[in-house]
Amino acid sequence: MFSRIIGTGRYLPERVLTNADLEKMVDTTDEWIRTRTGIERRHIAAEDQTTCDLAEGAVREAMSAAGIGPDDVDMLVVGTTTPDQIFPNVGCLLQKRLGIHGCAAFSVEAACTGFIYALGVADKFVRCGEVKTAVVVGAETLSRIVDWTDRSTCVLFGDGAGAVVLQAAEAPGIVSTHLHADGKYKDLLYYPTGVSKKTPEREDMQDVLTMRGNEVFKVAVSTLGRIVDETLAANNLDKHDIDWLIPHQANMRIINATARKLDMPLERVIITVQETGNTSAASVPMALDMAIRDGRIKRGDRLLLEAFGGGFTWGSALISY
Ligand code: ACO
């Protein structure tokens, strides 16, 4: 038994924040942001819009593309680090919106790798025969935890949501997923407080998304290189066997490095970072949906999805679409 993607969707909030807008907010330039990151604009959720609102837009599109209704959904898994509230989890909130009753619904927190983690979990449930149809979402409102006075982080992030519907099938589908984490890097990228910890553990920690960008960059490039190798080796594939790379959209220079590792021309890499910035768990499913809808990715193509994020967490999925 395998799981296969039968529908995808995405949702981006209406408000666009350009690099020119950011020039008026912090000491930065369009040129710096574009050359260091590739980002030109990002979408920001309206004040009354939550992660669940964005997720709902993406899931409705994915369910419609898959031709399924609420009664068909056996499991809902949401990758997010910016849930509406502590509980009920975003999966349960989505159930209420969509009229889905009774199936398991939960969120998975793995920062930018959240969608790959959610996909890996849902795929296992389908493979073992417990679930026939699963909705998998990556959704974030990172704009809510970014320090809008810190030029080193606020220029990087945006909001959005992407979703896929998985269904049981006799052939892949999802060929393999590879999930990893190493908490020893916890101080390189973090948000320091939560529910049980109200104050940061050290005085120098501020209560905002904090990143040692340069160090994150170096670990991200080498780790993503390794996960590409691991995924190819696990499936006895050569780098030239991949049709499309769908990377986490954090930084154009990191995407370039992974593409080089795969010897892949940029025309075979799905790139949305210029339009969306880093939307964390939403970035991979949004890029996937965009390339399926615009006709670049076709049935039968072999896809490599990868992501890297706070934790650190990282992961990949090899998919025969
Ligand atoms: N505008 C102008 N100058 C800036 C800005 C800005 N927005 N931000 C930083 N600078 C300055 C710095 O102050 C520094 O100045 P100095 O040399 O005078 O001290 C200079 O630019 C260079 O700063 P670096 O941090 O060394 O710049 P770098 O080339 O590393 O680029 C960046 C920074 C874009 C953040 C990069 O390191 C990066 O992309 N890192 C990885 C991000 C990532 O992948 N995160 C993982 C996922 S995120 C998640 O999980 C939530």
Image (spheres, rainbow, N blue to C red):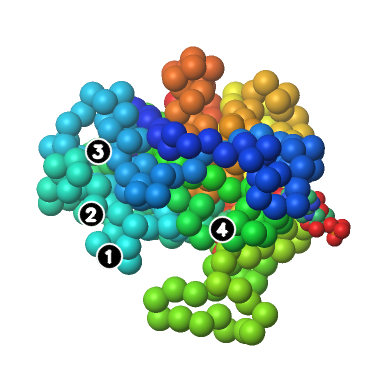
Which quadrant: the N terminus? top left
Q: Position of residue 188 (x, y in %)?
A: 67, 67
162, above or below 111, in the image: above
Q: Position of residue 157 (x, y in %)?
A: 58, 48
Say the numbered circle drawn on residue 87.
Answer: 1
Amino acid at pointer 4: Val
Say the numbered circle drawn on residue 146.
Answer: 4
Which residue corresponds to mark 3? 133
Say the numbered circle drawn on residue 92.
Answer: 2
Query: In this rendering, which labeled residue sits more in front, label 4 or label 3?
Result: 4
Outermost residue toward the front in this view = 24
Is 300 displayed left or right of 153 in the figure? left
Is 192 displayed left or right of 292 in the figure? right
Q: CA distance from mark 3 to mark 2?
A: 17 Å
242, above or below 45, in the image: above
Dot 4: within a 10 Å radius of its alpha carbon, few (fewer than 14), some, or many (20 or more) residues? Answer: many
Check contact, mark 2 vs mark 1: CB within 8 A: yes
Which mark sits nearer the N-terminus, 3 or 2?
2
Q: Nearer the viewer, residue 19 or 203?
A: 19
